[in-house]
Image (cartoon, grey):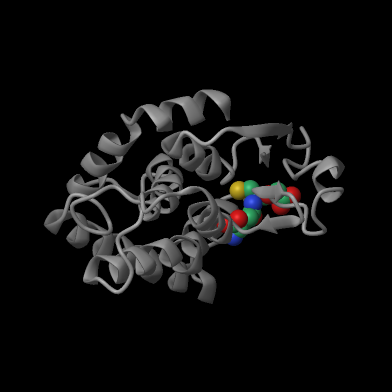
Amino acid sequence: MITVHHLNESRSRRVLWLLEELKTPYNLVNHQRDATTHLAPDSLKKVHPLAKAPVIVDGDITLCESGAVIEYILNTYSQNSLRPAPNTPEYYQYLEWLHFAEGSLSLPVISSLFMQMENRDGTQPMDGYIAKEIALDFSYIETTLKNRDYFAGDDFSAADIMMAVILEIAEKRGMLDGRTHTLNYLEKVQQRSAYQTALNLG
Ligand SMILES: N[C@@H](CCC(=O)N[C@@H](CS)C(=O)NCC(=O)O)C(=O)O
């Protein structure tokens, strides 16, 4: 059975959400962030040298990176669900958003989180770059969700799981203010029962 190493308040909620959607049984190992540093504890370093969540262990496979973990779980435990059929236009939309979440969007969202913990006058190169990326990314997301129900088209997919978790962080930071389609979308996916179960576990 697959084991999920979960860190509180982390991206590993994506993996719990996916497994709950698939109704795949799993072992859950909880790790608690250090109360002072908010970093992962040593117990996670024993599982993977990067000591970042999520990590899964399944037989001989130990894997980190939420996108890679999601692909692994779909390849291993899903019968054609939660991703469009390969080589369809929807599949390539799915692929774009699955990777966009960590490859593009997490950089400005997480950077701005850390930058607000510093004293900055707001004029350094990083301030301009992050502001530009936030405006660009959230405008692209808003236009996409104006035209379709989910990131890959008409159906909910694992790309939504990748995107929604980072959108939640963005919402808490006020980055979605005025983005009506994105806010409505987030509310919709948060009503899924697998989401609720993962939230309560995580
Ligand atoms: N791109 C990675 C990011 C992994 C990551 O940074 N995880 C954070 C939690 S969201 C973490 O483990 N932080 C604890 C630490 O850095 O000590 C992924 O999507 O899995």
Front-most of 103 and 93? 93
- Horizontal side of residue 148 vs 119, given as left or right: left
Identified at 53% across, 62% down, the residue is: 121
Measured as percent of width and height from the top left, residue 33 is found at: 73, 37
Quadrant containing the C terminus is: top right
Name of the residue lying farthest toward the left: 147
- Relative to 145, residue 103 above or below: below
Is residue 200 visible in the rendered structure shown here? yes
Q: Quadrant of residue 40?
A: top right
**Total numbered badges shown on the rendered structure:** 0
Name of the residue lying farthest toward the front: 79
Measured as percent of width and height from the top left, residue 29 is found at: 72, 33
- Horizontal side of residue 181 vs 98, given as left or right: left
Quadrant containing the N terminus is: top right
- Horizontal side of residue 72 vs 78, given as left or right: right
Identified at 84% across, 50% down, the residue is: 45
Identified at 12% across, 58% down, the residue is: 147
Q: Quadrant of residue 64?
A: bottom right
Front-most of 55 and 38? 55
Measured as percent of width and height from the top left, residue 164 is found at: 39, 46
Identified at 56% across, 57% down, the residue is: 72
- Horizontal side of residue 39 vs 94, given as left or right: right
- Relative to 24, residue 61 above or below: below
Q: Quadrant of residue 22?
A: top left
Is residue 118 visible in the rendered structure shown here? no
Front-most of 1 and 29? 1
